[in-house]
Image: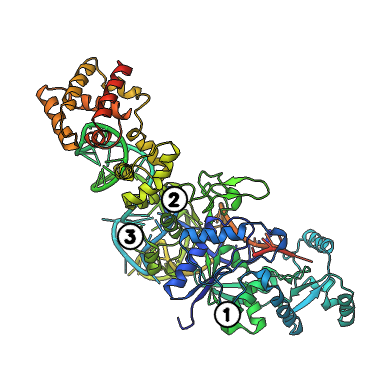
Amino acid sequence: MTQKVRVRFAPSPTGPLHIGGVRTALYNYLFARKHQGTFILRIEDTDQTRFVPGAEQYIMNSLRWSGIIVDEGIEEGGEYGPYRQSDRKHLYRQYADQLVETGFAYYAFDTPEELETMRKQLEESKATNTAYSPSTRGGMKNSLTLGEAETKSILDSGAPYVIRFKMPENEEVVATDLIRGEVRVNTSTLDDKVLFKSDGMPTYHLANVVDDYLMKISHVIRGEEWLPSMPLHVLLYRSFGWQDVMPKFAHLPLLLKPDGKGKLSKRDGDRLGFPVFPLQWTDPTSGEISSGYRESGYIPEAFINILAFLGWNPGTEQELFTMQELVDAFSIEHIHKAGAKFDFEKAKWFNHQYLVKLSDAELAGMFNPILEQKGIFTTLARVEKVCSLVKERVNFVKEVWEQASYFFLAPKDYDPEVIKKRWKPEIPAILKEVTQLLDGLNDFSAPDIHEALHFLLESKKYNFGQVMNCLRLSMVGTSKGPDLPVIMEFLGKKEVIFRIEKAVKTIG
RNA sequence: GGUCCGUUCAUCUAAGGGUUAGGAUUCAAGAUUUUCAUUCUUGCCAUAGGGGUUCGAAUCCCCUACGGACUACCA
């Protein structure tokens, strides 16, 4: 790589960023870091009608939570700013003018109604290309058909106009995509795209090419939905005379809806049973709330790991990667060509792997607020102990409570299945013996409890599994959880005896 | 409709002319455990179809089917 790597993530702030967008940002970021390059965040807000308050901040917050660090952007600054296209408005006009002057673009004055009529007529006549194009522009109202004088007078009158790209006729455009190879398209299937809108703003196509040029972007890594416009962009670079510094293109496979059809979209919200947004989002107009990965209890590192593997793989059998490991392993060659469906089950597994790797103190720090919400205030040491005992059995922090409530509260009711299977008529008497035995222990520690229990049950030849399970039922309310003596040590002698007596009284 | 892109287990994917087509998740069974979970072992499950090229094809070529994207003065 001779040229310095500069890549950009260029979302449009029309709502919350969904996970496909985060993945695009991630791949750009990994590529930049891998090559000691620069990762730029550029906001593409040239469509004023689709402005959504809060969306821009949401995008920046999402990247930050994900651990994707922006080098140049609105908040970070940089030599190539501003990084919001609406703040660059004054820049684009001259480039559109340049193309008109050099004959690569022209003015068009057709009204929306006239365009609609043209399309209808073309459809009826079964034309293969129903667009504003070399074959149709001759019948429309534009500077090509009206002549210089009339064009000038319309322009001077202040009438609305757009600037369109003058698509060459019947020319084969060859463009190279780093993931898919050469893509060939004949310009006769393309159209005279609007470059500059009547509201004074550029369209995506113009702004994108101009900004990538001005910001010295080396690689354009974006979603596959842009593949069809790559030929147009290549032609724009050529028309500007920038072909020598044109960035390389890589079009990422799409993230698909898991239930089958189509690319994942913002509207999928929570319909599929999992979040499509990194952070929770409240729609500013409807007030509708969409859940986020952060609020659902995903660990950011796990979230990134999951996303990284949707469309890319390291070529080895390693699956758990830190961000730095992803940077080291990443390469565009290993990006898969086909779209990927999100696998919710595997996402849970990933989160479990990261949750288990958390230290007890870290997990306790995340679980303690939930405990306090339940009205339980205890020492951090005890919370850590509980976390260490249950973390293997949960996928999310919020599940810790379900697995650990009995450490803090005596069971209210007892699993009828377990009662039916284990609670025999002789049990209350045996538990009475157990109570006396435990009461006599000086050191109420797990090893001592363990030893005493074994001694009693073996010497009296009691059914080990039966008694232990009833004891567990008394402590936990069902047959689950870690080693029983460990639970009992945690609860303490007084509470243990209380729970045994309560169970005997309740179950009978 | 047109243009372009794609297609390996249910899902994410490996194998870039020669492997019993590998791994992971899910699911099932077993082991371990007083229980549940973890863990470990085992199992089930795939090259869309058809033609070529080749000694040999998941891999290269063509056709078909299916899927997707795009086709706005949206990005």
Kind of residue at disc 1? Met
Could you tell me residue A416's position as x and y percent? Answer: 35, 22
- Residue placed under numbered mark 1 in the picture: A246
Residue A441 located left or right of residue A281 = left
Whether residue A122 is situated above or below residue A482 in the rendered picture: below
Work out how far the residue at label 1 is from the one at label 3, CA to CA, in angstroms: 36 Å
Residue plotted at (35% across, 37% down): A404
Measure how far apart labels 3 and 2 are at the Cα level: 23 Å
Q: Label 2 to label 1, Cα distance in Å?
A: 39 Å
Residue bearing mark 2: A298
x, y percentage for residue B33?
A: 20, 36
Q: Disc 3 vs disc 2: which is toward the camera? A: 2
Q: Which mark is residue A317?
A: 3
Marks 2 and 1 belong to one chain: yes
Please tell me how crowded label 2 is: few (under 14), some (14-19), or many (20+) other residues with Cα within 10 Å: many
Dot 3 amino acid type? Glu
